[in-house]
């Protein structure tokens, strides 16, 4: 799953989005509410909040250090560079 804002895009692996425990961790970790959980625990990306991203990496830390494999933050203003 991927959603694009003006400056930031967020890409989440399908298995991460379907994992209720990871969805909860991501929702709780993000200080600007980019993530939410839908009914059934599936992860949603809140598109209107994407450009509020402060590049804090808390979402990547929340998935256990496997950030780029499970969650990618893309800097669209920097030719789509991946936050590492």
Image (cartoon, rainbow, N blue to C red):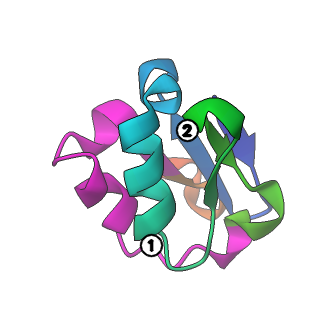
Residue 8 seen by the camera: yes
Left or right relative to 23: residue 42:
right
Q: In this view, does 34 lie above or below 80?
A: below
* Residue 47 painted magenta: no
Left or right relative to 60: residue 51:
right
Q: Nearer the viewer, residue 59 or 39?
A: 39
The location of residue 49, given as percent across then percent down, is 74, 68
Q: Which residue is drawn at 70% across and 63% down?
A: 50
Q: Is residue 53 above or below residue 41?
A: below
Q: Of callouts 1 and 2, which one flags the residue occurring earlier in the amino acid sequence?
A: 2
The location of residue 6, given as percent across then percent down, is 80, 62
Q: Nearer the viewer, residue 66 or 78?
A: 66
Regarding mark 1 in the picture, which secondary structure is present there?
A: loop
The location of residue 84, given as percent across then percent down, is 28, 55
Residue designated by label 2: 11
How packed is label 1: few (under 14 Cα within 10 Å), some, or many (20 or more)?
few
Query: What residue range appears in magenta?
Result: 51-73
How many angstroms separate mark 1 from mark 2 (CA)?
14 Å
Residue 84 seen by the camera: no
Residue designated by label 1: 55
Find the residue positioned furthest to the top. Answer: 15
């Amino acid at each position: 799953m991927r959603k694009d804002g003006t400056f930031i895009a967020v890409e989440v692996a399908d298995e991460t989005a379907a994992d209720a425990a990871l969805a909860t961790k991501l929702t709780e970790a993000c200080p600007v509410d980019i993530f939410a959980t839908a009914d059934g625990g599936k992860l949603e990306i809140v598109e209107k909040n994407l450009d509020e991203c402060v590049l804090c990496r808390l979402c990547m830390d929340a998935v256990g250090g496997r950030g780029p494999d499970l969650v990618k933050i893309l800097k669209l203003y920097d030719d789509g560079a991946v936050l590492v």
